[in-house]
Every structure is written in structure tokens, then in C-alpha cells.
Amino acid sequence: MKTNKLSVARLVRCAVIAAVYVVLCLALAPFSYGAVQVRIAEALCLLPVFGAEYIVGVTLGCFLANLLGSTVIDVVFGTLATLLACLVTYKLRNVRVKGLAIPASLPPVVFNMLIVGAFEITFFFSDTAPTAALAAFNAVAVGIGEIISCTVVGVALVKLVESNEGLKRIFTEK
């Protein structure tokens, strides 16, 4: 019986995070979509620091947000970038720099720079022929938004949860 309760709690947490990701993207749509974006919902990519269930929740949220607000290309490649980022973030969950989850914030930045910026935007959404310079520009543009969302807001979110016992219990309770 207790095992079932644990599974239900994790499932609910997963669904809530997916919903929060979608709501943040759609409510902040002008900032969440496009070649230059600061998708605040990407801060949630750091939640796998608190448990593997967040990998599914954040990835599902990204999938639904892209399905509702972007293109089928972004549904595929944006969701892939988020899934890979969350998986690596989970692997880095215990690594800290001066007590901050900075290393865990880097996978979303790197995967989105490469997959969304350098590949997706360059090959599917550019008005000119793809070039290395264009790919680098797009990667940097996406990377800046990801740094703001993940390395600034996401790291602050993790620090807030880790320093508040009530939040820590909500986010980590098995």
C-alpha cells in the first residue's frame, strides 16, 4: 500500500510540474517562443536535482507547451533538447559550486544551444542558407536565454527549495 502511495505522489508531482511548465510558457508566450527567447519555464529543468520524476514532468510540459504554442519541428527538437538536458541534470544533481547547483544548470544551456539554436533554428527557420556563422549566432542567442532561465532563475529556484524545509519536503518527499 505504501509503495502505491509513493507512486501516486510522484505522479501528481510530475503532472503539476508539466502543467506549471505549460502555463508559464503560454502566459509568457512573447518571451517563450522564437529565435530569441527567455523561456522562464526552462528554470524547471533543474528540478531533476530533487528526483527523477521531474525528468518526465518537465519533458512532458515542454512537449505540451511546444505542441500548443510552437511548431511540430520544435515539438520534436525542443522536447528532445529538454529530455537530454534533464537526464544529464539528474546525473549532476549532487554536484555544487560554492553550494549552488551551477553544474546542473549547464546541460539545458548546452543542449538547447546545440539542438535548438545551432540545428533547429539554423536549418528550419532561417531565411538564408545555413552557415557555420549563422549556426554559431543562433546557438549564442538561444544560450543567452537559457543562461538567464536556467543558470540564474533555475539555480535560484534550487537554492530556495534547498534552504526552505517546507519547500524541500514538498519537492523531495518520497
Image (cartoon, rainbow, N blue to C red):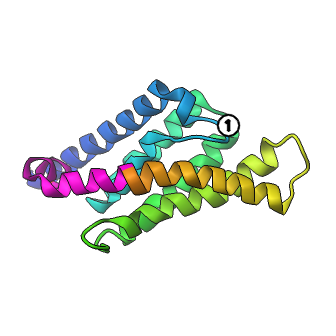
- Name the side, left or right, on which 15 lies relative to 172: right
Would residue 90 be seen by someone viewing this image from the given angle?
Answer: yes
Q: Quadrant of residue 132?
A: bottom right
Given the current orientation, which residue lies at the most extreme top position? 27
The residue tagged 1 is 72
Q: Secondary structure at mark 1?
A: helix
**Residue sitting at x 47%, y 28%:** 28
- Between residue 119 and residue 76, name the one nearer to us: 119
Counting from the top left corner in percent of width and height, residue 157 is at 29, 50
- Name the side, left or right, on which 131 lies relative to 29: right
* Residue 170 magenta-highlighted: yes
Counting from the top left corner in percent of width and height, residue 70 is at 62, 32
Q: Which is the main secondary structure of the residues drawn in magenta?
A: helix
**Residue sitting at x 14%, y 56%:** 163
Give, as a single range, the part of the protein colored magenta: 153-172
The image shows a total of numbered marks equal to 1
Counting from the top left corner in percent of width and height, residue 18 is at 38, 39
